[in-house]
Amino acid sequence: MRHDHRSCSAPTHSGRWITGGILLVDDHQIARKGVRALLDANALSICGEAENGLQAIDRVRALKPELVLLDLYMPGMNGVEAAFQIRQIAPATKIIFLTVQDCTPEAEAAVRLLGVQGFICKSCAATDLIPALKRSLQTD
């Protein structure tokens, strides 16, 4: 089932879609569903989802998320390229990379140069993701 960018958001009591919250960006739907379940279980607000870097940029413009949880390796535009573009259009938006691989030199450089809040390996997400998100969302 295909969704537009707003159908992944949570409606408010007035029935309008919310902005802010966390944008999930991963090219694998099963990964997005798993992360969504983890965030929902911890009462973290999800404003939308994207399948690739280009969609992520569009969603950032439309939804103005507080934080983007960004897969590093995606077809089309990878997470580092998307993070660079997100920094250009929404410099206050926080970014955390989430990926299957350990931290690579490319990811380490992106964390430093782009001001990315962190890097979480998917194999550690069950224990590390929620604390990292909460720390990032609590800091200004």
Image: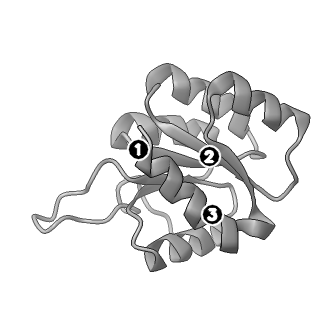
Expressed as whole percent of the image width and height from the top left, the position of residue 101 reads 87, 54
Q: Disc 3 to disc 1, how far (Cα)?
A: 16 Å
List the residue tagged with mark 2: 96
Residue 77 visible at all: no
List the residue tagged with mark 1: 66
Type of residue at label 2? Answer: Ile
Type of residue at label 1? Answer: Glu
Circle 2: is it few (<14), some (14-19), or many (20+) Cα within 10 Å?
many
Quarter assignment of residue 84: top right
Q: Which residue is depicted at the point 36% across and 62% down?
A: 7
- SS label for mark 1: loop
Q: Which residue is depicted at the point 89% across and 41% down?
A: 104
- SS label for mark 3: helix
Question: On screen, 42 above or below 18?
Answer: below
Who comes first in sequence, dot 3 or dot 1?
A: 1
Left or right: 113, with 85 as reference point: right
Q: Which residue is depicted at the point 61% across and 52% down?
A: 51
Circle 1: is it few (<14), some (14-19), or many (20+) Cα within 10 Å?
many
Identify the image quadrant of the C terminus. Answer: top left
Quarter assignment of residue 117: top right
Q: Residue furthest left?
A: 14
Left or right: 89, with 16 as reference point: right
List the residue tagged with mark 3: 129
Question: On screen, 19 above or below 117?
Answer: below
